[in-house]
Amino acid sequence: MLRRLALLSARHYSGPPIKRYNGFTNWPSLKWHTAFPAPAKIFTGVLSAAVTITHVHHNTLVTLGPPVAVGTYFIMRRINHQRFLRLLEGVRPENTTEWDDDGSKIRIWKYDETNVQNVLHGIDNEFQHKLAQALEVVEKKVVDYVVELESSDSVSLLVSLLLDENKQVVMHLGESPETFVTTRAEVVDRDGAERFVEFLRFSVALYSSKNIRNRRRLAVADVSLLAVPETEEAEDLDYRDYRMTIELTPYKLFGKPEKVQNTKTEISSADNFKQSGRN
């Protein structure tokens, strides 16, 4: 029964992205964040607090309650900040010359509401426009990574999950991100000056099929995007460059993540995302 519920949750999850740095790489995390609505979680918290109040002496609550609450808040805040710094370290270049490394850089075209291609793709805002381009690159990089490892006979558990019996890639990217966080990060630009640029982190599931009825959740791709500091001349361009890193984690309770090696990836349908009337 539990296995059946897990499969249903993994197949049919659909909803707005949740603010979270890491994806749902196992059934407990997926179930908790998708199957239980926010009101149910709040009700559970209130009920737990009520039970605690009725069973604990009020002097103990007055003495320990506020410090525990404040301490928990700051501990969680510090944990999230440390996680952010660790993720930023993974995508930020070690030296300023690496900002121009084509292998870890992708190009995101700016949104143009007059572009007919955006309408045809169902894109009607900057957020969807940016993610559509990023997801296309993620899919290409993951496929290239799997094919490269398969041809080199260096097949890990994760890679084997994404291959069928004929050694063909059977991975299908989810339609939209499951988690998403955006913030500003401090970096050092090419000239050695400190700048604040856009940092994005999102996750998307990898399935065995596009058919929702019988697809299996195979893995999760956690993606980091860090905007390359712009020069004054580049501010008027129709695109923005980002550094990208991808981590793949098998959908298991203790899945081990693998970092996709950076290789230059072209977007075959980039013309669909360019602003109309420009090159």
Image (tube, rainbow, N blue to C red):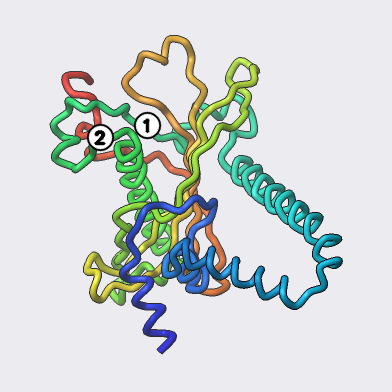
Q: Are marks 1 and 2 in contact (CB under 8 Å)?
A: yes
Circle 1 residues within 10 Å: few <14, some 14–19, many ≥20:
many
Viewer-proximal residue, 128 or 91? 128
Q: Where does residue 215 sit, x and y in percent of width and height?
A: 28, 72
On the question of residue 157 being in view, the answer is no
Q: Which residue is mark 1?
A: 107
Distance CA(mark 1)–CA(mark 2): 9 Å
> Is 17 drawn above or below residue 63 in the view shown?
above
Image side of residue 17 versus residue 212, left or right: right
Disc 1 secondary structure class? strand
Residue 151, image quadrant: bottom left
Identify the residue shown where x is 80% and y is 65%.
61
Image side of residue 86 versus residue 150, left or right: right
Q: Where does residue 210 sit, x and y in percent of width and height?
A: 24, 65
Q: Quadrant of the N terminus?
A: bottom left
Q: Which mark is residue 270?
A: 2
> Is 79 drawn above or below residue 57 in the view shown?
above
On the question of residue 132 being in view, the answer is yes
Q: Where does residue 192 sit, x and y in percent of width and height?
A: 65, 18
Q: Amino acid at mark 1?
A: Arg
Q: Quadrant of the C terminus?
A: top left
Circle 2 residues within 10 Å: few <14, some 14–19, many ≥20:
few
Residue sitting farthest toward the top = 233
Q: Where does residue 142 sit, x and y in percent of width and height?
A: 39, 54
Identify the residue shown where x is 34% and y is 76%.
8
Q: Earlier in the sequence, mark 1 or mark 2?
A: 1
